[in-house]
Image (tube, grey):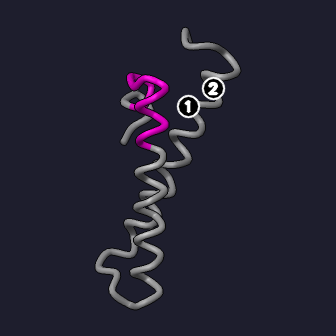
Amino acid sequence: MKASEIRKLSAAEMDAKLAELKKELFNLRFQQAVNQLDNPMRINAVKKDIARIKTVQRDIELHGANS
């Protein structure tokens, strides 16, 4: 997910997407712990998506929705 796509989401949609990604990250880490993870690079991708959403949320918090 790109930052431009995230900026188009509403605050509620961003929160929902963030919760979904955190749940997915938990499940991926659990799969890794029991050696059932198919794609270990997915963990990095999910962590980066979480960081992107948090960055956009912080930017909106500091500069308002018009940025």
> 40 left or right of 22?
left
Q: Is residue 65 above or below residue 3?
A: above
Q: Is residue 1 above or below residue 62?
A: below
Does the magenta portion include 13?
A: yes
Q: Main secondary structure of the magenta part?
A: helix
Kindly identify the residue that appears in the image at 36 percent across and 30 percent down.
5
Q: Look at mark 1 in the image and give the residue it sits on.
A: 56
Residue 41 in percent (x, y) is at 39, 69
Residue 51 in percent (x, y) is at 56, 47
Which quarter of the figure is the C terminus placed in?
top right
Occupied quadrant, residue 7: top left
SS type, badge 1 = helix
Q: Is residue 25 above or below residue 4?
A: below
Q: Disc 1 residue type?
A: Val
Which quarter of the figure is the N terminus placed in?
top left
Name the residue furthest bottom.
35
Residue 56 in percent (x, y) is at 55, 31
Nearest the eye: 38 or 15: 15
Q: Look at mark 2 in the image and give the residue it sits on.
A: 59
Labels 1 & 2 near each other (Cβ < 8 A): yes
Q: Is residue 34 above or below residue 22?
A: below
Per the rendered image, the range of residues in magenta is 6-17
Kindly identify the residue that appears in the image at 51 percent across and 49 percent down.
50
Name the residue furthest left.
38
Q: CA distance from mark 1 to mark 2?
A: 5 Å
